[in-house]
Structures are given as C-alpha cells and as structure tokens.
Image (cartoon, helix red, strand yellow):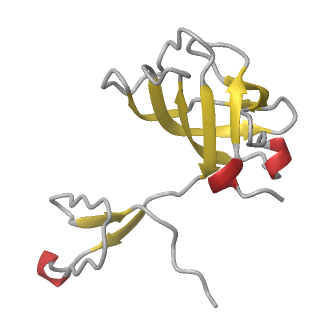
Amino acid sequence: MSNFVTSCRFNAVSGGVGSFVVASAVAGHVTPNNASAADKVYHYYAQTPDGLQSEEGHGVYSVATQTLLRTTIDQNSVGTFVPINFVVAPEVDIFPSVLPLEIPLQKIDDMVINGGMDVSVARKPRHLRILGNPPQET
C-alpha cells in the first residue's frame, strides 16, 4: 500500500467545473486506486500545472469510476467557495479526510494551545473547532 500523504497525485482527464476523473498518475506518484483508496470522503488540492488556478476541498472518491466529486470547496485561487473552471486539466493531490472536532468550552480562559492549529470560537454557545485527527488509542 502506498502512502497517501506523499504519493497520491493524479492528472485529471479534463478541466472545467465537473468532477475529477483520473487519467494517469503524475510522474513519481500513484493514482488513488494504486494507493488503496476506498469509496469515502477525501481532502484534495488541485492546481493547473502552471499553478495559476487552484482549489482545495473535500469530496467522495469512487473506486469503480476513478472519480473524485468536488462536494465542498474550502478555498480557491479566486477567493470563492465554488468549483474553479479549470482551463486545463489539473493535477490533483488527495489525502485522507480529517473532519473537524468540536468541543464545548465552559470558559474560554481554560484553553491552552501547544503548537499551531486552526482555532475558531463561536459566540453562543462557545465551541472550539480543532482540525486534526482525534487521539488514537495505543
């Protein structure tokens, strides 16, 4: 099994605003199917070879059709949350998806952060949003 974080990158069949269909692996990388992908949600980062257009989001990958849906757009190179109309077929990196973990806070003063992280606090009720993997049992 290949390591998604370092090796899963593919060339999409075409540009446009549709789903990403796997054409081939980018040189030195593997396709999702060769990285033992499953039919589930993945985080992706897509960009044109020249880097002028880019998009980051989450979508369901289908092993049978080798297609990654562009379900949720987190950010793109034009500052919107809609799929980029790629002028050429992008290169797409996919990673295991990490879902936000929300923890209710009794007092914001009780929060201690060791290391960097994305933090947002809603007003009522207060919640801390942690982006990362939940602790694993050893």
Q: Quadrant of the C terminus?
A: bottom right
Q: Residue furthest right?
A: 64
Q: Is residue 47 above or below residue 85?
A: below
For the point 58% across and 29% down, the residue is 70
Q: Quadrant of the N terminus?
A: bottom right
Indicate left or right for 91 with 114 as reference. Answer: right
The picture places residue 65, in percent across and down from the top left corner, at 84, 29
Closest to the observer, 136 or 23: 23
For the point 21% across and 66% down, the residue is 126
Indicate left or right for 136 with 2 as reference. Answer: left
The picture places residue 8, in percent across and down from the top left corner, at 70, 45
The picture places residue 121, in percent across and down from the top left corner, at 21, 61
For the point 61% across and 87% down, the residue is 137
Indicate left or right for 77 with 64 as reference. Answer: left
Closest to the observer, 101 or 18: 18
The picture places residue 14, in percent across and down from the top left corner, at 68, 13
Q: Residue furthest left?
A: 109
Determine the image quadrant of residue 129: bottom left
Determine the image quadrant of residue 130: bottom left
Q: Residue furthest bottom?
A: 138
For the point 63% across and 55% down, the residue is 5
Determine the image quadrant of residue 66: top right
